[in-house]
Image (spheres, rainbow, N blue to C red):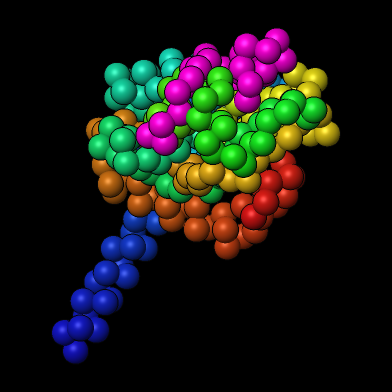
Amino acid sequence: MVLRLRALFTLVLLVLALQARADTLAPYQIVSGNLPPFAVESGPDHPGALASLVHDMALRLGTAPAIQFYPWTRALSIVGAQPRTLILPLTRTPERENNYRWIVKLYRQQFVFMALRGASINLNAMDTLRGLRIAVLRGSPNESHLLNRNFQQVLPANSVLDMARMLERGMADAIYGGEAINLAVLADYGMTRAQLQVSKPLDYGEIWLGGSLDIPESEALLWQNAMKQLVRDGVVRRTLARYGLPQ
């Protein structure tokens, strides 16, 4: 009997949390970088697959502030300095674990190397790659991914677009990062998938909606329940399919 009462009490608390309205929350802001196909600042693919999911979750919580786009390192500095700030798409790593409130998991990505097709590089030969010039996105976990594997020439760039320019101009032998993001940006730059060679995945990472540390776990629970609703209603499946992302 006691166990049943406890279970009922827990269920009541969960229902109350689900019914909580966002007007009981303090105002918050959402920041991101232009990282298609996950977050897209402008154009026909705006706002991007994961930004669209965050918008839909926010609507189910009662309000959806516009996502503010910045260079990625600037977005990271904002969430570290300003209260009640959310950020996406943020890869969760052990190094970042204590720096953010991890609100809700959005997607799982894979990290690969890319080079121009025709370049005499075996992208799956780690011993060879360790001595080459590899461009990565500044502020991402990819730099430490490679340095921890004894790569000797890791070149941080301010944007994936800069990484594309470095590859095209011969300033980098290859680039490393999230496959979906890099393919999308390089395609916009004019490098099609047919012009590139892509390695097997070197690593995987979970992409999260993160937040400043002042955001309480109780609010994270509301976001997580909203995400469960999107999964249940088929919104996640349809959104990922619309942007051509594997599920």
Give the answer, above or below, for where 2 lies relative to 46: below
Report the side of 109 relative to 182 (left or right): left
Give the answer, above or below, for where 73 lies relative to 237: above
Residue at the image point whose x is 58% and y is 45% from the top = 201
Give the answer, above or below, for where 31 lies relative to 239: above
> The magenta stretch spans which residues?
148-174
Residue at the image point whose x is 68% and y is 12% from the top = 170
- Quadrant (top left, top right, bottom left, bottom right) of the C terminus: bottom right
**Is 153 within the magenta?**
yes
- Quadrant (top left, top right, bottom left, bottom right) of the N terminus: bottom left
Q: Position of residue 116 (x, y in %)?
A: 74, 26
Q: Nearer the viewer, residue 225 or 204?
A: 204
Q: Tell how many labels.
A: 0
Give the answer, above or below, for where 126 lies relative to 227: above
Q: Position of residue 44 (x, y in %)?
A: 77, 27
Report the side of 218 relative to 201 (left or right): left
